């Protein structure tokens, strides 16, 4: 039996994002984002209720400061006490998991959406996704980009403005474009 474009998307396979089912999901997410991004003046419990409406899982104490942007929301899992500062973007065509206690600075982008390298396939409108996993107690500095398919290990630090194109080992500190591991300073 043929798989739907949404089933292909969720499996990380090549799919057409313009399919009616995917477009309906994107429209629902945009409607939710309008409400969420108008919620800055609401109480934390009211904002949490909005997050629970749309995201796959929201751990106790998880906070996203609006404005926030995502593709669908239903592929995002937030652990307990996760914090995302203003203007974060998560392109969640597949799973994005953020572990307990992760701290994510403003303007961070977490991208799962990917495109074929072959120009003919890309011209056809096909795209795909690769999951992103961010471990527990990770600190991601403002303006960093986490690229498709990256896993960031527990206790890692991503420097502000870094572009993370490869997996980051637990406890490592990475900086730059592309992000490279640096040795911690004494003290």
Image (spheres, rainbow, N blue to C red):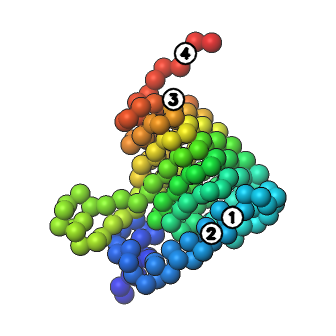
Q: Where is residue 94 in the image (x, y as percent from the top left)?
A: 47, 63
Q: Where is residue 62 in the image (x, y as percent from the top left)?
A: 72, 52
Q: Does the rendering let one see residue 170?
A: no
Question: Split into 4 quadrants, where in the image is the N terminus?
Answer: bottom left
Residue corresponding to mark 2: 34
Measured Cα–Cα span from mark 4 to mark 3: 11 Å
Residue corresponding to mark 3: 173
| Residue extending farthest left | 120
177 or 78: nearer the eye?
177
Looking at the rendered structure, which numbered label has been put on residue 38?
A: 1
Question: Split into 4 quadrants, where in the image is the C terminus?
Answer: top right
Measured Cα–Cα span from mark 1 to mark 3: 35 Å
Residue corresponding to mark 4: 185
Total numbered badges shown on the rendered structure = 4
The residue positioned 38% from the left and 78% from the top of the image is 18
Nearer mark to the viewer, of 4 and 2:
2
Ranked by sequence position, the earlier of labels 4 and 2 is 2
* Badge 1 element: loop
Ranked by sequence position, the earlier of labels 4 and 3 is 3
């Amino acid at each position: 039996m043929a798989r739907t474009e949404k089933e292909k998307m969720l499996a990380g396979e090549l799919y057409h994002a313009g399919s009616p089912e995917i477009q309906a999901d994107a429209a629902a997410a945009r409607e939710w984002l309008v409400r969420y991004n108008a919620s800055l003046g609401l109480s934390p419990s009211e904002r949490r209720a909005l997050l629970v409406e749309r995201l796959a899982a929201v751990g106790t104490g998880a906070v996203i400061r609006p404005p926030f942007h995502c593709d669908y929301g239903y592929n995002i899992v937030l652990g307990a006490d996760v914090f995302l500062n203003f203007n974060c973007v998560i392109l969640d065509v597949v799973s994005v998991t953020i572990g307990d206690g992760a701290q994510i600075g403003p303007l961070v982008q977490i991208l799962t959406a990917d495109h074929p390298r072959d120009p003919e396939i890309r011209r056809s409108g096909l795209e795909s996704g690769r999951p992103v996993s961010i471990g527990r107690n990770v600190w991601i500095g403002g303006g960093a980009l986490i690229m498709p398919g990256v896993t960031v290990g527990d206790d890692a630090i991503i420097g502000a403005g870094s572009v993370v194109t490869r997996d980051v080992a637990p406890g490592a500190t990475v900086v730059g474009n592309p992000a490279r591991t640096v040795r911690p300073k004494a003290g």
